[in-house]
Amino acid sequence: GHNLQQQNCSSCHKVHAGKNSLLRDDQAKFCLDCHQDVKTQFIRRSAHPVRKLNVTCISCHSMSQASDMEPTYSLNRVCEDCHSDLTGPYLYEHETVHGWSPEGTGCNGCHNPHGSENDKLLRQPTDQMCRQCHAVPGHAVAPTLVAAHTLVAPDGNFSRFACIECHTDVHGSNSNDRLLDPDLPARLGVGCSCHGLE
């Protein structure tokens, strides 16, 4: 913790600040004095709006208990405070979004919570993000990945389509176990009976 980094109470608090929290400042700007590596992440193309003070370090890191710093399940809980529209519950879950699941990595598996050069705080560009799991030998989807996409790309070059063009419900779906766009047949102008989207 902070005490191991030679921080003391006055590094973050003022004893006679006259505020309930006794923090040096309400926006917790003092965090970035030490966390320079994180500070640079907030200037990336896609970032949480910490520089505009729409959120602050203590919006996510309350520092009230040790579990606030956990990178998987408890941090997912923090993400859900603002992003409840993405958390479900869903009839068809994308296992990776659950930090408590053996298959899951939690929000941080795909997103860098501070900032990224990729859209939507993604750790990698969208298709690379998907394929890091779904195209790996041994993954449950890998053996059928190419075969399942020959309808979309008969020449075998399914990589010309972005995964998210069809698989729009990446966090989970209430309509399709492959997390496909419910309006896909209308968009493509073809039947999608194989995916149960007729």
Image (spheres, helix red, strand yellow):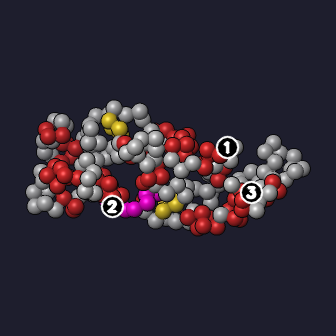
Indicate the position of residue 18 as horizontal and vertical percent values: 87, 46
Mark 3 vs mark 1: in front: 3
Q: Amino acid at mark 1?
A: Gln
Quickly name the residue at label 1.
65
Task: Name the image quarter holding the N terminus.
Answer: bottom right
Q: Counting residues from the N terminus, which is met first, the one under dot 2 or under dot 3?
A: 3
Is residue 149 at all visible to an observer of this figure? Answer: no
The Cα atoms of the two marked residues, 2 and 1, are separated by 35 Å
**Magenta segment:** 120-127
Indicate the position of residue 46 as horizontal and vertical percent values: 49, 60
Query: Residue sitting at 46 percent across and 48 percent down?
Result: 107
Mark 2 vs mark 1: in front: 1
Q: Secondary structure at mark 3?
A: helix
The Cα atoms of the two marked residues, 2 and 3, are separated by 39 Å
Query: Residue sitting at 17 percent across and 55 percent down?
Result: 146
Mark 2 vs mark 3: in front: 3
- Front residue of 53/141: it is 141
Quickly name the residue at label 2.
128
Indicate the position of residue 25 as horizontal and vertical percent values: 77, 54
Marks 3,1: beta carbons within 8 A? no
Q: Residues within 10 Å of mark 1 (few under 14, many from 20)?
A: few
Is residue 84 at all visible to an observer of this figure? Answer: yes
Left or right of 45 on screen, residue 31: right
Quickly name the residue at label 3.
3
The Cα atoms of the two marked residues, 3 and 1, are separated by 14 Å
- Front residue of 180/140: it is 140
Indicate the position of residue 118 as horizontal and vertical percent values: 43, 62
Q: Amino acid at mark 2?
A: Gln
Query: Residue sitting at 28 percent across and 34 percent down?
Result: 175
Q: Secondary structure at mark 1?
A: loop
Q: Counting residues from the N terminus, which is met first, the one under dot 2 or under dot 1?
A: 1
Q: Looking at the picture, does residue 135 appear above or below residue 19?
A: below
